[in-house]
Image: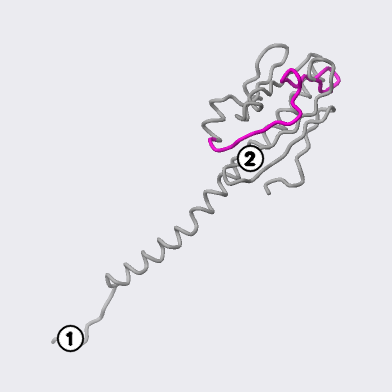
Amino acid sequence: MTRTGRSHRGFTLIELMVTIGIAAILGLLVVPNLVSMVDSGKTAVLVNKFPQDVAWARNQAVTTQQAVEIDLTGIAANSCTWNTQVGGQPSGEHSMSPQQFNAQYPNVKCNITNPPATGKLIFDSQGFVSDGNNNPAAPIITVTAARGQTWTMQVLASGSVILSSNTAS
């Protein structure tokens, strides 16, 4: 017995090529948006880390009754780094080193307006911030991601950090 009609199973080479071509075009459309979302997410992590470190420093100053310093000279140099010290001892966990910043946030820039005269935020035993010369400090820090998203934070004399209403614009 011979079969006169063949049963075709599978795909032809042309069908596979068309499907792969469509998938490639869709991938090219999605990848730039995906990269932008990942960059924005990483920058948001950095933007949230700074207020957390400021809150921790304020809490440490109040609970230990000793001065806590956050050195902002790295932010003044556009590198978004800061160093926290409690009683002269560095706290790496609540700082952002240049190595960490360069590895995790290579395309992020920071700018500081109204920097403290000494370049440091110093929390006293009541949790208030000064520049070390008994002048209140209220710096405004602007963080800019690679794709142009910006976040603005202001450190108040009370030790609180306010994020702008235009966050991730």
Mark 1 surroundings within 10 Å by alpha-carbon count, few (fewer than 14), some (14 through 19), many (20 or more) = few
Say whether residue 29 is left or right of residue 135.
left
On residue 76, the disc is none
Q: Is residue 31 magenta?
A: no
Q: Hey, which quadrant is residue 7 in on the image?
A: bottom left
The disc labelled 2 sits on which kind of residue?
Thr
Q: Is residue 58 above or below residue 154?
A: above
Residue occupied by mark 1 = 3
Q: Is residue 107 above or below residue 66?
A: below
Total numbered labels:
2
Viewer-nearest residue: 140 or 65: 140
Viewer-nearest residue: 164 or 44: 164
**Mark 2 near mark 1, Cβ–Cβ under 8 Å?**
no
On residue 144, the disc is 2
Residue under the point 57% across and 49% down:
37
Mark 2 or mark 1, which is nearer to you? 2
Q: Is residue 159 above or below residue 125?
A: below
Residue under the point 84% across and 17% down:
125
Q: Which residues are magenta?
A: 106-130
Q: Hey, which quadrant is residue 33 in on the image?
A: bottom right
Image quarter of the N terminus: bottom left
Secondary structure at badge 2 equals: strand
The disc labelled 1 sits on which kind of residue?
Arg
Residue under the point 73% across and 20% down:
120
Instruction: Where is residue 86? Give x, y as percent.
Output: 72, 16
Secondary structure at badge 1 equals: loop
* Earlier-in-chain disc, 2 versus 1: 1
What colour scheme governs how the chains and residues are painted in the rendered image of this protein? one colour
Instruction: Where is residue 77? Give x, y as percent.
Output: 62, 26
Q: Is residue 119 above or below residue 28?
A: above
Q: Is residue 124 magenta?
A: yes
The extreme top residue here reads: 88
